[in-house]
Structure formats: structure tokens, C-alpha cells
Image: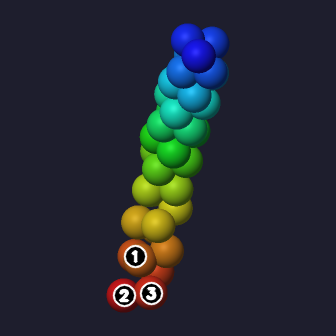
Amino acid sequence: MKQALAIIGAVLVLAYLLIQALLAVLQPLIVALAGKLH
């Protein structure tokens, strides 16, 4: 049971870090696109 919880925790942390990285990369692109549209 502890092993399963550890795996779930690791997956959640990795998913969180991946989302943070994606947001950090996408934010400037979204800002640039918004700037071009307006």
C-alpha cells in the first residue's frame, strides 16, 4: 500500500512540475500572440 501511495505521489509531483514548465513556456507565446491580435 505504501508503495502505491509513493508512486501516486511521484506521479502527482511530476505532473505538477510538467504543468508548471508548460505554463512557463506557453505564457510568453500567449502574450506574444495576444499582442499580435490586438
**Residue beneath the point at 52% across and 33% down:** 12
**Residue beneath the point at 63% across and 13% down:** 3
Q: Are marks 3 and 2 in contact (CB under 8 Å)?
A: yes
**Nearer the observer, 16 or 32:** 16
Q: Which residue is mark 3?
A: 37
Where residue 37 sits, quadrant-wise, is bottom left
Q: Is residue 25 visible?
A: no
Give me the C-alpha separation between circle 1 and circle 3. Answer: 6 Å
**Residue beneath the point at 44% across and 56% down:** 27
**Residue beneath the point at 52% across and 56% down:** 26
Give me the C-alpha separation between circle 3 and circle 2. Answer: 4 Å
Q: Left of 20 or right of it: where is 4? A: right
Helix, strand or loop under label 2: loop
Which mark, residue 6? Answer: none
Q: Answer above or below: position of 32 versus 21.
A: below
Helix, strand or loop under label 3: helix
Q: Left of 10 or right of it: where is 30? A: left
Q: Which residue is mark 2?
A: 38
- Where is the N terminus found, in terms of image quarters? top right
Outermost residue on the front side: it is 1
Outermost residue on the top side: it is 2
Residue type at mark 1?
Gly
Residue type at mark 2?
His
Q: Is residue 29 visible?
A: yes
Q: Which residue is mark 1?
A: 35
Q: Are marks 1 and 2 in contact (CB under 8 Å)?
A: yes
Residue 5 place in picture, x, y as percent: 54, 21
Q: Answer above or below: position of 14 versus 27.
A: above
Q: Residues within 10 Å of mark 3 (few under 14, many from 20)?
A: few
**Nearer the observer, 4 or 36:** 4
- Where is the C terminus found, in terms of image quarters? bottom left
Where residue 31 sits, quadrant-wise, is bottom left
